[in-house]
Amino acid sequence: MIFQGETISVSVDDAGIATMLFDNKHEPVNKFDLATLDELKASVTAMSEHGKIQGLLIESRKDSFVVGADIKQFHSLFDHSEEEIAANVVSFNEVFAGLEDVPFPTVSLVDGIALGGGLELALSTDFRVLSTCAKVGLPEVKLGINPGFGGTIRLPRLIGVDNAVEWIATGKEYRPDAALSVGLADAVVASDQLVASGLSLIAQANAGKLSIARIREVKTNPVMLNDMERIMAFTTAKGLVASQAGPNMPAPLTSVKSIEKSCSLHREAAIKVEAKYFSRLAKTEVSGNLIGLFLNEQDLSKRNKTAAHGTASIDKVAVVGAGIMGGGIAYQAGFKGKQVVMKDVAQAGLDQGMEEATKLLSKRVDRGRMSAAEMAHIISRIHPVLHYEDFSDADAIVEAVVERLDIKQSVLSEVEKNVPTDTVIASNTSTLSISKMAEGIARPENFCGMHFFNPVHRMPLVEVIRGAKTSEATVGKVVKLALDMGKTPIVVNDCPGFYVNRVLFPYLNGFNLLVRDGADFLAVDKVMEKWGWPMGPAYLIDVVGIDTGCHAAQVMAEGFPDRMQFDEVSAMQLMLEANRLGQKNGAGFYSYQPDKKGKPRKAADDTVSSVIAPAVAGQGKFTDEEVIERLMIPMCFEVARCIEDGIVSNAVDADMGLLMGIGFPLFRGGPIRYIESVGIAYMIEQSKKYHDLGAMYHAPELLKEYAANGKSLFAFGGAA
C-alpha cells in the first residue's frame, strides 16, 4: 500500500500495476468532498514518486463508481467571491491534470453511477471501461452550474463538440451503449470482466499498440476545428440550447459558451475559462435555488425511507373504481411490478380502466421503450373484476371512486368488510376530509389518504394524508406503496384540499379577482408563463377541468370561508355554466383541437370574452409586477399558513409539494425559497397594497414573527 486515506487507497502489485480504490469509510457512496480531493492529490503524488508503476486501474468498492461532488459543501464554497471560487476551481483541476499526466497508462473501471465529478475523474484517465450496468453523465446544469473538474474541456475533445454540447447542456444520464457509440467508453463489459479489460488496455499501451501520448495530445490541445466549422457549430448549438433551456436557466447556454471559449485553447488556459464561467454561475440565485432543491430532495428521500423502513412488502394492490384515474393507478402499480386487482361496479368502468392502462403501455411500445411482450406481461398483472373475491390477499387497497363524501364512505365501508382486519386502505381524493371519510368505517387507524395527481403516470408527487385516527404504521405502509410505485410522497395532515390544492386555490382566486377587475386573462397567462410557470392560471384550469376546479373551489370555500369564499360570480363559474369544461370537451378559456399526435393544442377563442363578461366589473390595467403579486402573494401566504397549522411539517415539504405537484418553477426553488429570495418583510409590505381585496392578502402570524426576528423559514421544524 503506497497510500491510504479515508476514501482512497493505492496499492501496487508485483507486476507494477497500481490500483486506486475508492471506498468511502463514512458514506454509502463515493463522492468528491474537499477531503477526497486532497486524498486524490496525495495519491497522485505518491504514485508519481513510486518510480516502478507500469499502469493504473481506478475502481470502486461501492455499488457505484463516484456519484459526483459533495453538494452539501457547495453553499459554503459558493459563499466566496467569484474570483475566489474561480481560483479554487483551478486548484481542483490541477489535481485532475496531475492524474492525466502520470507517466504510465491509466484506466477507469466504471461500474454503476459515474456522474459529474465521477465522470470527470474518468475523463482524466487514458481509457474508460464501463460495465453493462454503468450510468454516466454530467448533470451539473441541473444545479445551475457548468462542469468544474474539466468536463467542458475533455469531453468535447473526446467525443466531438456536437455530442459534448448535447451531453453537457441537457445534463442527461447515459447508458454504456450510448457512451461507447460516441467514443467516451473504450469498452463495455460485464462487471466481472472490468479488471481483465483494463489490464488488457494497459498491456496494449505498454506494448505500443495503443498510444497514450496521442490520447493525451488530443485531450490537452485545442479542438481540431477551423474558424468556419467553429462558427457554424456554436452558432447552431447556442440557438438550440437557448430555445430549449429558456431565459430562466442560464447554465446550459453558459456551458456551451464555456466549451466555445475553451476549445481553441490548451488545457491550462481552458481550465481558467471553465473556472470563470463556473464561478459566475455559482453566484446566481438560480444556482442557489437548484442546489437547495437537490438537498431538499435528499432530505425528503431520507425521511421517506425512514418512514417506510420495516414495513412488510406490498406485492398485491387492489384498486376500487376504474375509469381514467383508477386505470392510471392500476397501470402505475402494474408497471412497477405489482399484482393488481381493479374493481368497478360496471363493466364499462373496467373497460375504460383497462383501455387507459393499455393506451399508456402502447405509447411506450410505439416509442421503443418497451417490447410488445413486456407490455403483454404487464397487462397480465392487472385483473379487472366486478366483485370482491380477489381482495382477500391484497396487501393494500386504493379507493378511487367519484369525489363525493357519501359515495366514498359507502364504498369504504363495503371494502373494509371484504378485506382482512389489518389491511391498509387509502382513498385517492383531492379535497375531501380523510377524518370525515373515516367516520363510516370500523378501523380508521388502517385508513389514510393517497392523493395521486393527474395524469398519474407523469406526475411524481403523491400526498399521503394522515387522518385524525390514522396510525403511523398505516402512514409508513402507504409511503412504501408510493415509493414502490415510483412516486415521491409527502406526508401531510388532514384539512380541506390538504396541502397542494389548499395553496392552489388562493392563486386561482387571485386570478378570478384580476379578471373581475378587468385584466385580460390571455395577458395574465403570458406574464405568469414568463415568470416561470409551465402554464398560466387560465390554461391551468382548462387542463385540470373547469368542472373539477369549481367543485374543489366550493370545498375550499366551505373550509376557509374567511379567505377562499368568492362572493361574486367568477369567470370559472360562468365557464362551467356555459359547458366550457376545458380540454376535456375542447372549450374552456381556450379552444382545443388535437394536433398530429392527438394532443390538445390550445388557441385563443374570441367567444370567451362574452361568456365571462358578467364577471368583469372593472377596466383595470395591470403591470407585470402587479399581476405577479396579486397571484403569488395569496399562494405564498397560504403556504406559510399550512406550515403554521401543521399541515406540512417543514419548509422542505412545502417546497417539494408545489414543485412536484403543480409545476412551481424549478429555478425558483419552491414557494418558501421564493418568499425568502424576495424577503419576508418585503412581501408583507407589498401585500398591504392589496388588503382591500380580502383576507387572503393578509400576512399570517408566522411570517410576521419570522420577519420581525430575521429568521429563516427553513429553520421551522428542523428543516434542512
Image (cartoon, rainbow, N blue to C red):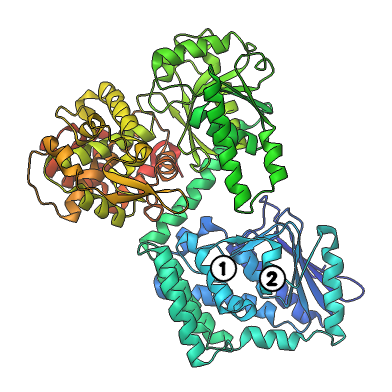
How many numbered discs?
Answer: 2
Q: Please tell me which residue lies in front, 674 or 535.
A: 535
Instruction: Determine if residue 644 is in view.
Output: no
| Residue that numbered label 2 is attached to | 181
Q: Are marks 1 and 2 in contact (CB under 8 Å)?
A: no
Q: Toward the viewer: 506 or 240? A: 240
Residue drawn at (85%, 62%) of the image? 193
Q: Residue at x 59, y 38 (%)?
A: 358
**Disc 2 marks which amino acid?**
Ser
Question: Relative to residue 705, is residue 178 drawn left or right?
Answer: right
Residue 587 visible, this orientation? yes
Identity of the amino acid at label 1?
A: Trp
Q: Is the residue 111 above or below the residue 466 in the image?
A: below
Percent of width and height locating residue 373: 72, 43
Secondary structure beneath label 1: helix
Chain-order first, disc 1 or disc 2: 1
**Hey, which residue is sitting farthest right in the picture?**
14
When asked about the image quadrant of residue 545, the answer is top left
Q: Which mark is residue 167?
A: 1
Expressed as whole percent of the image width and height from the top left, the position of residue 290 reads: 44, 56
The answer for how far apart the CA atoms under marks 1 and 2 are is 13 Å
Which of 536/288 is in front?
Answer: 536
Q: Nearer the viewer, residue 453 or 264?
A: 453
Element marked by disc 2:
helix
Q: Position of residue 601 (x, y in %)?
A: 37, 50
Residue at x 30%, y 23% (from the top left corner):
555
Look at discs 1 and 2 and give the one toward the viewer: 2
